[in-house]
């Protein structure tokens, strides 16, 4: 019955999941969620697989939470970390001391960025990367207004959260200032009721209307995810970005491309999707798959934004530390040497074809979309009304887990199944994912 799961690699921890869940409930904030109705305790990981405390193996179809790019515990990265520990290499330097690791990483990541982007800073997370990008944009332009998209997610810190287009993530009384939202480029649920044949990029033009009607006419920045992650892998067409960057620049703003989910070779063959799509960005922010599980984020920026900050101090205690930066650097090496970005394009196409094929049999699938190995499957109760199939999506995720496949979900109404495995995934694993989803959908119908 269970095609993926196997029991080799058992790594018993002696902790019962129920007991840990109960203690979590007692000690943590009530905002700390778990995936799945029966939460999973994960104790071991290797390549594309993870194991629970009972030794059960799962194919990781969501890469942690889109954080594992080159595969869990890649041998090359593991060996280097073990050697660093054995040699008592220094763990913490901040940028106040000099270390080769952040310098090499900066050179390597800037070589992958569009030509106008020449400067880098490292943080511990995507939220901090976006905070720093807003700060730089505001400093460089002398303006404060930042535009976001409805349905976007940019992080849990104050300024990043203020740019978040989901009510679930916002808090009462949490300050939201100098922020305005443009309409979402959500083709499946076009806010302008257009279809592919009738569309003339009203969503992109809405950025200009938003500036003209909700700002004083000049802006500091606009932040956009090239594929909207938490929003449900909404993937606008390339032309959208051409028009939006033109408008943002016309009104004096910096364009920030939030590649926290899309970066690290996951989408269209380049390390950055901004480059593949030719997005005329002034800044790119990164995290998640950039560190392949290590807590590291980055802001890459143009000379104008960076130089505007000269004369001020900006400091991040752990940003640029050796153990984090070496992991990001080796992740980049592995992705390049093992041609994983090329693999993501081929496997992404295979996955998309397979999932689109399932639409013939399963009416509940309303849309399949994405770029590379960032693939969303939107579930609806009825293809005409497009009513969100929220409970069904949670049930499908649980059923796939029971068959040894971990997936994520997203979208404002939690009805988009999110598939983003490590980009090292192979054909047999992609086919297995499709067949487990197919079987689980059949079981949920019966
Ligand atoms: C597009 C995007 N930007 C920023 C963030 C925030 O990153 P972090 O959770 O590392 O602070 C996230 C997290 O999910 C994200 O998806």
Image: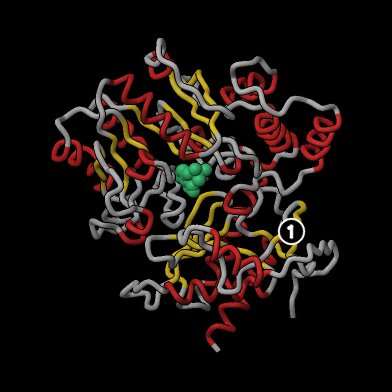
Q: Residue at x 45, y 47 (%)?
A: 227
Rendered image quadrant of residue 353: bottom right
- The answer to whether 63 is drawn above or below residue 268 in the figure is below
Quarter of the image that includes the C terminus: bottom right
**Closer to us: 212 or 368:** 212
Q: Quadrant of residue 241?
A: top left
Q: Does 155 sit left or right of 445 as displayed?
A: left
Give the colour scheme shown: secondary structure
Residue 426 locus on image (x, y percent): 72, 54
Q: Is residue 281 left or right of residue 222?
A: right
Where residue 233 sits: x, y (%)? 46, 54
Picture coordinates of residue 96 (x, y %)? 59, 16
**Is the residue 78 above or below the residue 189 in the image?**
above
Give the position of the N terminus as an image quadrant: bottom right
Mark 1 CB near ligand 1 (8 Å cut): no
Is label 1 in a helix, a strand or a loop?
A: strand
Residue at the (61%, 39%) spot, across then down? 295
Vertical arrangement, residue 359 with respect to residue 111, above or below: below
Q: Residue furthest front?
A: 26
x, y percent for residue 445:
53, 85
Q: Quadrant of residue 385?
A: bottom left
Q: How many marks?
A: 1
For disc 1, the neighbor class at 10 Å (few under 14, some 14 to 19, many from 20) is: some
Q: Residue drawn at (38%, 54%), measured in percent from left and top? A: 169
Q: Which residue, given by chain and number where applicable, does mark 1 sit on?
A: 43
């Amino acid at each position: 019955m269970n095609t993926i799961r196997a029991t080799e690699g058992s790594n018993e921890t002696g902790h019962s999941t129920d007991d840990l869940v109960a203690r979590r409930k007692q000690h943590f904030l009530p905002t700390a969620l778990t995936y799945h109705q029966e939460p999973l305790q994960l104790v071991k990981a290797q390549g594309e697989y993870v194991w629970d405390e009972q030794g059960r193996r799962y194919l990781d179809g969501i890469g942690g939470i889109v954080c594992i790019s080159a595969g869990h515990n890649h041998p090359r990265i593991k060996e280097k970390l073990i050697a660093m520990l054995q040699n008592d290499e220094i763990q913490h330097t901040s940028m106040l001391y000099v270390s080769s690791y952040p310098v090499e990483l900066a050179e390597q990541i800037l070589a992958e960025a569009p030509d106008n982007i020449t400067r880098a800073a490292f943080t511990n997370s995507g939220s901090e990367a976006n905070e720093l990008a807003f700060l730089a944009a505001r400093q460089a332009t002398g303006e404060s207004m930042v535009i976001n998209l409805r349905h976007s997610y940019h992080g849990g810190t104050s300024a990043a959260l203020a740019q978040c287009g989901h009510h679930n993530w916002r808090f009462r009384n949490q300050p939201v200032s100098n922020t305005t939202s443009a309409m979402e480029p959500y083709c499946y649920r076009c806010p302008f009721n257009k279809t592919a044949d009738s569309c003339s990029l009203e969503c992109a033009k809405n950025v200009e209307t938003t500036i003209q009607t909700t700002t004083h006419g000049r802006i500091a920045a606009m932040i956009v995810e090239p594929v909207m992650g938490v929003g449900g892998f909404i993937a606008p067409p390339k032309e959208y970005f051409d028009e939006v960057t033109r408008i943002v620049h016309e009104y004096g703003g910096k364009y920030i491309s939030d590649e926290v989910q899309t970066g690290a070779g996951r989408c269209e063959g380049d390390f950055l999707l901004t480059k593949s799509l030719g997005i005329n960005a002034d800044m790119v922010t990164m995290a998640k798959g950039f560190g392949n599980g290590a807590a590291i984020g980055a802001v890459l920026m143009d000379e104008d934004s960076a130089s505007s900050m000269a004369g001020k101090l900006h400091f991040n205690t752990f940003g640029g530390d050796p153990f984090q930066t070496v992991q990001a650097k080796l992740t980049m090496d592995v992705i390049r040497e093992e041609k994983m970005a090329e693999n993501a394009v081929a496997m992404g196409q295979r996955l998309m074809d397979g999932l689109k094929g399932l639409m013939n049999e399963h009416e509940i699938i309303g849309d399949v979309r994405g770029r590379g190995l960032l693939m969303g499957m939107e579930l609806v109760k009825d293809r005409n009304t497009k009513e969100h199939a929220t409970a069904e999506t949670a049930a499908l995720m649980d059923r796939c887990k029971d068959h040894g496949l971990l997936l994520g979900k997203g979208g404002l109404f939690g009805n988009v199944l999110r598939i983003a495995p490590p980009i090292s995934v192979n054909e047999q694993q992609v086919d297995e994912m499709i067949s487990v989803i197919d079987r689980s959908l059949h079981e949920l119908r019966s």
